[in-house]
Image (cartoon, helix red, strand yellow):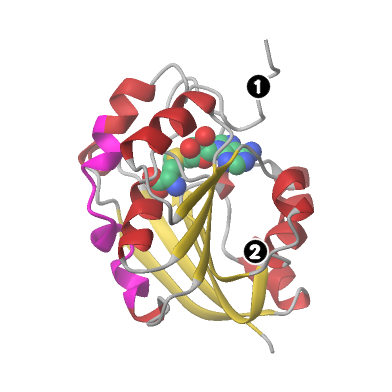
Amino acid sequence: MQPQVSGTEGYAAEADQLFVRYENIPPQQVHAAVLHLLPRTPARVLDIGAGTGRDAAWLAGLGHRVVAVEPTEALRIRAMRLHASPAITWIDDSLPDLAALSARGEQFDLVMLTAVLMHLDDAQRRRALPNIATQVAPRGTLIMTLRHGPIPPGRRMFEVDAAAVVAPMRQLGLDLELNRQTASVGAANQAAGVSWTTLAFARRP
Ligand SMILES: C[S@@+](CC[C@H](N)C(=O)[O-])C[C@H]1O[C@@H](n2cnc3c(N)ncnc32)[C@H](O)[C@@H]1O
């Protein structure tokens, strides 16, 4: 059996429920704060920690080519079937290193990191940020959400402060464009009192 990727604890066991939960959240609502920052013409998009493929499918439907990175096999295999599309390429890879993705040598106009960074501890996050930043093409956009609130049993999560991301990203050539606090869209997280910070960055040319 493959060793479990750090951060994915609990996801495979809950895959059935997560497909119902995540697929019933409209992506336009999750990303309401940043809809105006999405590319308006067909673009190269990377979704890191793509989960059930909800956002990858949405973005492919908008005309983009999407690379979806997801380390939890129980999500990835099923997501590939549910959202079968020639516009989506699925990759088995993980933060902090993104080794398989980086070996492809691509860059992206838009990089999405939705509800993922909280799975890395401080040392992993510091290692991950350069590997995320390097995926963003010059003038490209990076959008991420940071989770705040109680940690569900069985999950490995950490509180991430926006400042712990914004300053290193600036050093890496990505300037903050947007910092917005938002309530949860999903009913379960709403009930648990989970809230989010949405950050968007622009890569200097
Ligand atoms: C809360 S879910 C979010 C899924 C999707 N982005 C969404 O918004 O519906 C977190 C996702 O991050 C993935 N994940 C956990 N640890 C990871 C890691 N080290 N690298 C990349 N993805 C990871 C999980 O497998 C899961 O699919």
Q: What residue type is labelled 1?
A: Gln
The verdict on residue 140 being magenta is no
Q: Can residue 65 be seen in this view?
A: yes
Number of labels in the image equals 2
Q: Is the magenta stretch mostly helix, strand or loop?
A: helix
Asked if 94 appears above or below 106 in the picture, the reply is: above
Residue 142, x across and y down, in percent: 55, 69
The one of 188 and 192 positioned closer to us in this rendering: 188
The residue pinned by badge 1 equals 4
Magenta residues span 20-35
Q: Is the C-beta separation of discs 2 and 1 under 8 Å?
A: no
Q: Residue 165 carries which label?
A: 2
Q: Single out the residue that lies furthest toward the bottom.
A: 205
Q: Single out the residue that lies furthest toward the front.
A: 86
Give the side of residue 110 with respect to residue 184, left or right.
Answer: right
Give the side of residue 178 with respect to residue 94, left or right.
Answer: left
